[in-house]
Amino acid sequence: MKAVQVVGYHQDMVLNEIPKPELTGPLDVIVRIGGAGVCRTDLHVLEGQWAEKSNVTLPYTIGHENAGWVDAIGDAVTNVAVGDKVILHPLITCGLCRACRAGDDVHCENSQFPGIDTNGGYAEYLRTTARSVVKLDDSLEPADVAALADAGLTAYHAAAKVDRLTRPGETCVVIGAGGLGHIGIQVLNAISGVTIVVVDRNPDAVALAVEVGAHHGIVADGSHVDQVLELTGGHGAEAVLDFVGEGGATAEGIAMLRRAGNYFVVGYGENIDVPTIDVISTEINFIGNLVGSYNDLGELMTLAAQGKVALHTTTYPLDDFAKALADLDAGRVRGRAILIP
């Protein structure tokens, strides 16, 4: 089968011909890929940022946002059948460790992460397990929802935290209205009563944010912090949901945050630099967000089937993976880029 592989860091990926994955255990599921999301994390992988964390052996197949059709199942699989449309939770988890037993499978002690530390979905087929497949509603197609497997799941996981820690009428500033941000805005609208203020450097992204449900859209032009403070009566927002996490976004986000507010970190790339006395005196909180649980993904698929969350996508043939990554890196992708074998 065809597969896009990382053969070395700081160099181009290669489209290789490799063996199709085979069933190796009773709970294995082989999925024929119908869509693989192109994520900024893929660029960070190529930059070597994940090399020490993943300890993956090169070459390996990249791609961690995957959906498709069940092609084969192990003897013990009962939750899906061959031919079913599925989206894949990004982690392969054990189900036996303390975290899994608590439903916090994203912190599984024995997890594998296809596309990060084992073969992923920039390919025609992928091997996962019964614990990782979520059946899709008949109204949904793999290529249309693939990026919800990670980008959407991460956005949902963080937005659900915002919902738990805010009240209707309070303000949430969303920094970044790109691939993750435009999903997070829809989720906040679907499950929360917050007033959504979106900040992005790209006017087109701001326009998309308002189109999908943001109450206020602000172009980051140097006056955006003051505009947020003006909208909030000088106090700042109760929550800041940061999908950027680099390029000075965190310093600006902290300046938009109300006393006793919560800063939800999703995007990454820079350090948070804030005097500890400011954390204490204003009693602000920094909350990390890593993907989301299997149950989170199931709930997100319910919202998608109800038409409350939809991806804006640009599709590319698998052979055009280099163009898809280049377009993402240059900011030319509106919503999410999807590779289709």
Image (cartoon, grey):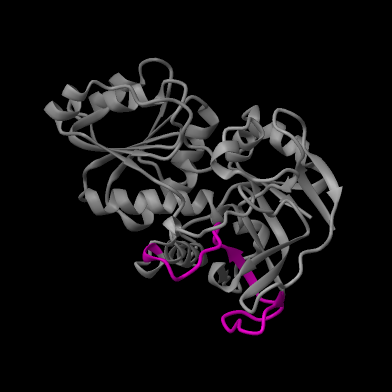
Query: Does residue 332 appear in the picture of this structure?
Result: no
Please tell me which residue is depicted at 39% across the width and 15% down the height of the picture: 222
Q: Is residue 84 above or below residue 316?
A: below
**Residue 227, position in %: x, y?**
30, 23
Please tell me which residue is depicted at 43% across the width and 30% down the height of the picture: 245
Q: Which residues are magenta?
A: 72-99
Q: Is residue 79 magenta?
A: yes
Q: Is residue 177 above or below residue 37?
A: above
Q: Is residue 303 magenta?
A: no
Please tell me which residue is depicted at 29% across the width and 26% down the height of the picture: 254
**Residue 8, position in %: x, y?**
74, 34
Image quadrant occupied by the N terminus: bottom right
Q: Is residue 300 above or below residue 85?
A: above
Quarter of the image for residue 106 reads: bottom left
Quarter of the image for residue 102 reads: bottom left
Left or right: 324 as drawn, with respect to 179 = right
